[in-house]
Image (spheres, rainbow, N blue to C red):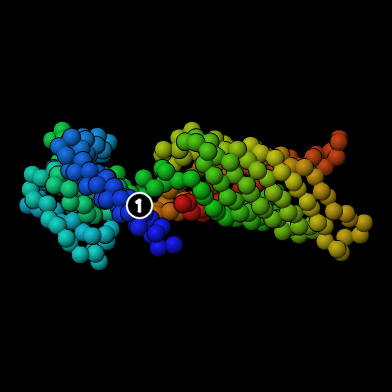
Amino acid sequence: MNRQNPPLCGWRSAFARTGLALFLVAAAAAHSPAVRAADANADTDADADVERVQVADPYIELHTGPGRGYPVHFVAAREEWIAITLRHTDWYKVRTAGGKVGWVHRRQLETTLTEAGGKKTFRDIAIDDYLGRRVQLGAAWGRFKSEPMLKFWASYKLSETLSVEGTLGQVQGLYSGTDFWHVNVLAEPWSDQRLSPFFGIGLGKFKNFPNQSLVGASVTDAKLGNAGIGALYHVSERLVLRVDYTIYTAFIADTRTGEYRAVTAGLSFFF
């Protein structure tokens, strides 16, 4: 057994020496001029994809995080170029020409100059969030054939102008109550505007429950079609005001339909 140990130890020693040699070769290659030039080219290519601005004030403070509670760890001097790489609410992540990375508030960046020499401008952050919205949840109150109506909806934006929306509604009438749901496709041709009209069409289900005091009344369960128009208005932050006018058609029987008109107004929030 002892005669087998030396060859095993020798193999391990040779393996360790080979690994050390490979590590030293890799380390030397990483610090070679060719690799440094490649890294520099990669950084240049990355910078080509971001916006660069020049400091016009005496200095700009770079924080360690997106908030005033984070300490200032670097100061970029006048005429220094910085690249804007990321946004978080009113804070922007920037990188200086010397490689320092930090967060700057929008108010300070508004004093910088663009590469064309003009003053840097920023669109309202709330408007940017509104234009990039995807999911909306909302509730509205209104009248359904002169009776009080409450509805809730959720929508998902498929593209700049098209959305899919699901709605749950309830009508509390004097002699009956109605529950319904439907799924719509909405077209919003001017979705980049703060006041944006839309058009919708969809299908769903309709169920009417007569009051128990009515003799001989039965529950009506029918398919439901609808078409409507409306408008969205971005109020502030993530709140949107919505008004709409909808025509509902309930297919009660093969030869019988009921038509109802509804007007609602409500609020939604997006994220």
Check the image and name the residue furthest to the front.
3
Q: Is residue 57 visible?
A: yes
Residue at which label 1 appears: 11
Q: Is residue 228 above or below residue 69?
A: above
**Residue at the image position 41 percent from the left and 39 percent from the top:** 193
Residue placed most toward the observer, 23 or 270: 23
Secondary element at tag 1: helix
Q: Is residue 181 left or right of residue 133?
A: right
Residue 46 position, x and y percent, is 26, 38
Q: Quadrant of residue 131?
A: top left
The image quadrant where one finds the N terminus is bottom left
Residue 95 position, x and y percent, is 20, 47
**Residue at the image position 53 percent from the left and 36 percent from the top:** 162
Residue placed most toward the observer, 34 or 179: 34
**Residue at the image position 74 percent from the left and 46 percent from the top:** 205
Kind of residue sitting beneath label 1: Trp
Q: Is residue 215 left or right of residue 198?
A: right
Q: Check disc 1: other Cα within 10 Å, few if <14, some if 14-19, many if 20+.
A: few
Check the image and name the residue furthest to the bottom.
69
Number of numbered discs: 1
Q: Is residue 228 visible?
A: no
Residue 198 position, x and y percent, is 53, 38
**Residue at the image position 87 percent from the left and 64 percent from the top:** 213
Residue placed most toward the observer, 20 or 181: 20
Q: Is residue 152 left or right of residue 242?
A: right
Residue 170 position, x and y percent, is 69, 55
Q: Quadrant of residue 70?
A: bottom left
Q: Is residue 77 left or right of residue 228?
A: left
Check the image and name the residue furthest to the right.
216
Residue placed most toward the observer, 229 or 30: 30
